[in-house]
Amino acid sequence: MRSSGGFHGRRIQKTGGSTYIISLPKNWVTARGLGPGDVLLFTPRADGSLTIFAETTGHAEAERRVVDVSNTMDSEHLFRRLIAEYIAGYPLLEIRTEGRMSPRTREVVRNFAQRMIGPEILEETSESVILQDVVGANPLPIPSIIRREHQMVRAMHADAMAAFRARDATIARDVIDRDWEVDRLHWFLEKQVTSALRDARVLATLELTLPECSTYLLASRVLERIADHAVRIAGSVTILGRDPTPEKLASALDRMAEAAATALTDALDSLDTRDIPKANRVIDEAQELTRERDHILRELASKRGRLAVGLAYVLESLERSAFYASDLAEIAINRAVESSPRADELLAVRPPKAVAAVPSA
């Protein structure tokens, strides 16, 4: 056996006519309670390595997470803590207080379970609530989640602009309420990626590489941020009240909204198709929107009061949405390059003469 840099080496041996075998480190086998006859599973990785793990059934006790909280904890702080525990990906989550759990704390836990994808209340006692993830690690492919997020974000922006033009508080409130749908999809995707990082078996079910998981997580974060700006546009309806928007400004903002929506769709297309020229066009067009922004700002300089404030909010959110789309286009470029054939793969298919012609370093 050889050891180098924390890795244990084993020589490949051949037995029979066509079977290759290697031995396993004794301490690894005994630490996991394994012995002769136990089954090991393996999965090949994109980098050419193999991941080996023992066959298991059911959920191990180690996958049960106990979270001690206080009844005096701020409700928002508790909710954020539960989101973090959810993203960590444990199948069983026990929220426990010292002594009887207060109605307020229990209500936060129940509200959390209703908003997230997966957790259901399994058991309740006077001092604890146990949540179980009933959907598992991969009920919905990650690319499908991204497409669903995109559809929701585009619809939210379109409705937010409709609410802005009509000063319709009902449509605006609907946009704000739908932000939770994007958030819960993003948190669910983040949970999947976190679970894949911790467990190779989960990664195998996702049918993605770790770099692809990272790419989709970044894309999801961008979409979630764009949804937040749709909420800001919808919120401007309250600021503006019934004050009409000058037609010239309204038309300019409509053009920016359309450009931002197109940029987002094109950026997502370039991510799916690995189309670098298309992604570059999205980035260039987002930068060109700064000229439109400057033009609108000059128009806004002559306005006063809440009209100026409300329109400034809309303008900023449209600009930020366009630049988030350009961020997504940059992610698309990075993915396209990462998935390109590696240098060693290109050398492997070249004829020997071409390889020999490369001067040595």
Image: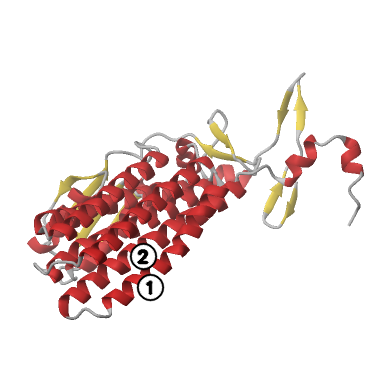
| Residue located at (20% from left, 50% from top) | 115
Can residue 98 be seen from the camera position used here? no
Asked which secondary structure carries label 2, the reply is helix
What residue is shown at x 26% (from left), y 48% (from top)?
155
The residue nearer to you, when weighing 38 against 175, is 175
Residue at horizontal 32 percent and vertical 42 percent from the top? 148
Q: Is residue 144 left or right of residue 34?
A: left
Mark 2 highlights which residue?
Answer: 319
Asked which secondary structure carries label 1, the reply is helix
Mark 1 or 2: the one toward you: 1
Number of residues whose C-alpha sits closer than 10 Å to that of mark 1, classed few (under 14), some (14–19) or many (20 or more): few
**Cα distance, mark 1 to mark 2?**
11 Å
> Which residue is pictured at 33% across the width and 53% down the height?
258
Rendered view: 177 above or below 75: above
Quadrant where the C terminus lies?
bottom right
Q: Nearer the viewer, residue 10 or 359?
A: 359
Q: Position of residue 219 (x, y in %)?
A: 43, 52
Q: How is the image coloured?
A: secondary structure
Left or right for 204, reference 125:
right
Question: Would you say 293 lies left or right of 343 here?
Answer: left
Q: Quadrant of residue 243?
A: bottom left
Residue under numbered circle 1: 294
Residue type, label 2: Glu
Amino acid type at image mark 1:
Asp
First in sequence, mark 1 or 2: give its number: 1
In this rendering, the answer to whether 326 lies above or below 11 is below
Residue 240 position, x and y percent, is: 14, 70
State the residue in front, 282 or 268: 282
